Image: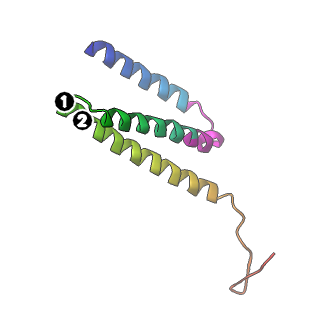
Amino acid sequence: MLIESLAVLVLAGFVGFTVISKVPNTLHTPLMSGTNAIHGIVLLGGLIVLGHGAEGVLNKILLVIAIAFGTINVVGGFLVTDRMLAMFKAKPEQKAGKEVEK
């Protein structure tokens, strides 16, 4: 079972890298938003499994670590997405240190 799981992990990593490396730069922001939504579902699943009582201390520790890393990924992804989208907002024009209203 361990060899099969490792083979799936390696193949998934290879396929993921191959797919992501072919994405053009203009699609990174929408792709990141979609990935954050999917990872939010993964976080919810981890919380549900942890709440229903995972067996074994190692399983619980791994679940907590996965939930922590997933949370960091989701929050960081949304912050980066927000920052990238802020670059496209129109900035108010300034004259002599004062803002001009439109």
Residue occupied by mark 1: 56
| In magenta segment, residue 59 | no
For marks 2 and 1, give the CA distance. 7 Å
In the rendered image, residue 10, in percent from the top left (x then y), is placed at: 37, 21
Three-letter residue code for mark 1 = Gly
What number of labels is visible? 2
Residue occupied by mark 2: 60
Q: Quadrant of the C terminus?
A: bottom right
Tell me the residue at 60%/33% (across/down).
23
Tell me the residue at 37%/22% (across/down).
9
Tell me the residue at 42%/26% (across/down).
13
67 is higher (above) or lower (below) than 78: above
Residue extending furthest toward the right: 102
In the rendered image, residue 50, in percent from the top left (x then y), is placed at: 31, 36
Quarter of the figure with residue 68: top left
- Residue 57 lies left or right of residue 94; in this view the side is left
Three-letter residue code for mark 2 = Lys
In the rendered image, residue 51, in percent from the top left (x then y), is placed at: 32, 37
Q: Classify mark 2: helix, strand or loop.
A: helix
51 is higher (above) or lower (below) than 84: above
Residue extending furthest toward the left: 57
Mark 2 near mark 1, Cβ–Cβ under 8 Å? yes
Q: For the residue carrying disc 1, how many other residues have a C-alpha within 10 Å: few (<14), some (14-19), or many (20+)?
A: few
Stretch in magenta: 21-33
